[in-house]
Amino acid sequence: MLRSRRPGFTLIELLVVIAIIAVLIALLLPAVQAAREAARRSQCVNNFKQMGLAMHNYHGALGSFPIGRMGSGYDYSPQAPQRRTWAFSILPYLEQGNLFNSVNFDLQFYEGANTTVIRSGIAAFQCPSDTPTMQEPDTAYPRSKGSIVVNWGNTHFFQDETNSAINAGRNNGPVTYPGDSSGNPFTGPLGTVSFMGAPFKGNHSTNLRDITDGTSNTILCGEVIMGPNSGAPNYDHRGDIFNDDYNCTMFMTYTPPNSSIPDALAGDANGEPYCSWRLPNTPPCTGGTPVFNASRSRHPGGVNTLMADGSVKFMKDSISPPTWQALGSIAGGEVISADSY
């Protein structure tokens, strides 16, 4: 009696099916990744909008935007110069009133009584496209970091400050660019630029009347990539929002978004740059001074920005440096075309 054979796949047919499946997966994965990034970027935009509401509610209540940073280098005698940044001040307007109430403003930001605040990961400060990280995790004062930081103007950390007390003993590392640490005008890798004001400064608050360039033509906040930390000596200041030190809670528009020009992050007493240059996926950096750092993100093609009028705009990496620098100033008097960014 003859038995009929069941039809089956030959080896060649099986290999063809596997190859087709592999091609389909290869085509599908980028689409899935793009969809996930679109969702992360949308959440990032929402966080910027929340920050815009918080900033304007703060302005409405107190008549100005928060002081950029306070503490080191400033004279508050007879009180001691307690170090803190705008990130503390804005907490009640981000529905973080309980955290704000736990801050001891008589102590430095890193002291024990303030560890509850500085260790708290706050989603409103972060962009989901970036990876959350802790600053100085091997110390007694590890800190949560943020992607959303404030605009420090179109030059460098010291802006137009010339008082030697501001930068005395705080300019370690090689002097990469001409002039002293408070140079204004500033000459760097993109030429000479004069400081034209910023919405956030050291020991000074700015109000809407000061923004004579127009609120729709002035950046209030932008993105940075939270520099990775793995313990000494790999400490990266970028995104260290509660710290008033170099490059921590701010960015400058001297270099364009996601610039290939390394961020200048000075260095500690041993000349070690305040960036994790040894670790993978670290944004470009050097130990040079005067210090400046660009706006950076994990989004392809550009960065999100919060304008002073409360709108959120995506700025392309291809924006021209003069236009980007003009958007970073508050009183430069530049004429910016709507189609230039």
Image (cartoon, grey):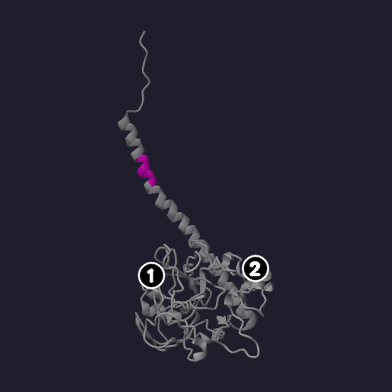
Q: Nearer the viewer, mark 1 or mark 2?
A: 2
The tag on residue 317 is 1
Along the line of sight, which residue is nearer the eye, 85 or 217?
A: 85
**Can you tell which mark lies on residue 241?**
none
Q: Secondary structure at mark 2?
A: helix
Q: Is residue 54 above or below residue 38?
A: below
Contact between marks 1 and 2 (CB within 8 A): the answer is: no
Q: Give x and y (percent) for residue 116.
A: 65, 68
Q: Is residue 203 visible?
A: yes
Q: Confirm whether the magenta stretch covers residue 79.
A: no
| Badge 1 amino acid | Asp
In the image as oriented, which residue stretches furthest toward the front?
Answer: 270
- Dominant SS of magenta comes to helix
Q: Quick check: can you spot residue 95?
A: no
**Which badge, 1 or 2, comes first in the chain's sequence?**
2
Q: Please, is residue 103 above or below residue 27 in the view?
A: below
Q: Amino acid at mark 2?
A: Thr
Q: What span is in magenta? A: 20-25
- Foreground of the two, 328 or 251: 251
Residue 165 in percent (x, y) is at 52, 90
Q: Quadrant of the C terminus?
A: bottom left
User: Could you classify mark 2 by the number of other residues whose Cα lies within 10 Å: few (under 14), some (14-19), or many (20 or more)?
Assistant: few
Question: Can you tell which quarter of the image residue 187 is in?
Answer: bottom left
From the top left corner, tell me how far across and down residue 50 is, in percent. 57, 69
| Residue 189 point in image, percent of width and height | 34, 80
Task: Identify the residue position indicated by label 2 in the image.
Answer: 116
Q: Residue furthest top?
A: 1
